Image: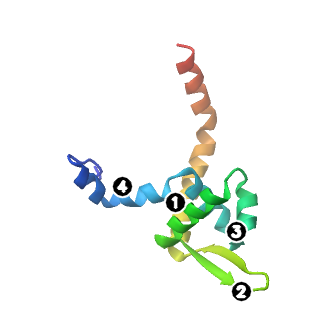
Amino acid sequence: MLPVTAKTKEQAEDCPIRQVLSQVTGKWQILIVLVLEDGALRFGALRRTIGDVTQRVLTENLRKLERDGYITRSVDPGPPVAVSYALTPLGQELLEHMKSLTIWAAGRHQQVLDSRSAYDSK
């Protein structure tokens, strides 16, 4: 088994698997990486494509992904100033794993709905 269990808070905080997964498995991080699959997007286009995300939340998540090396931020001084985001090689590698997970999730969606329904009817 992978070393993901911890007996103390310090062990949990030092766990490399937890550190990485905590930054890439949130709802917005996954959507951002998936949306950037086809290439760089400006902030506004990224926000419109994702849909129901606020400017503040999108900015926070883009900064986290940039800090960890999954995306790059490019500024075109304009006028007008344009900021765009693109996947790095590390982000491309992450994308491949996320695509596998999304394919799996799509194929199991009905099974999950059926399980929820059965559970809720108890």
CB atoms of marks 3 and 1 within 8 Å: no
Which residue is under mark 1?
A: 97
Label 3 sits on a secondary structure element that is: helix
Quadrant housing residue 108:
top right
Three-letter code for the amino acid on which mark 4 is drawn: Arg
Q: Which residue is mark 2?
A: 77
Quick one: label 4 or label 1, which is nearer the N terminus?
Answer: 4
Q: Earlier in the sequence, mark 3 or mark 1?
A: 3
Q: CA distance from mark 1 to mark 2?
A: 34 Å
> Which residue is at the front of the view, 120 or 46?
46
Q: Nearer the viewer, mark 3 or mark 1?
A: 3
Disc 2 marks a residue whose amino acid type is Pro
Q: Position of residue 44 (x, y in %)?
A: 74, 66
Mark 3 belongs to which amino acid? Phe
- Contact (Cβ within 8 Å) of mark 4 with mark 2: no
Eye-nearest disc, 2 or 3:
2
Q: Are marks 4 and 3 in contact (CB under 8 Å)?
A: no
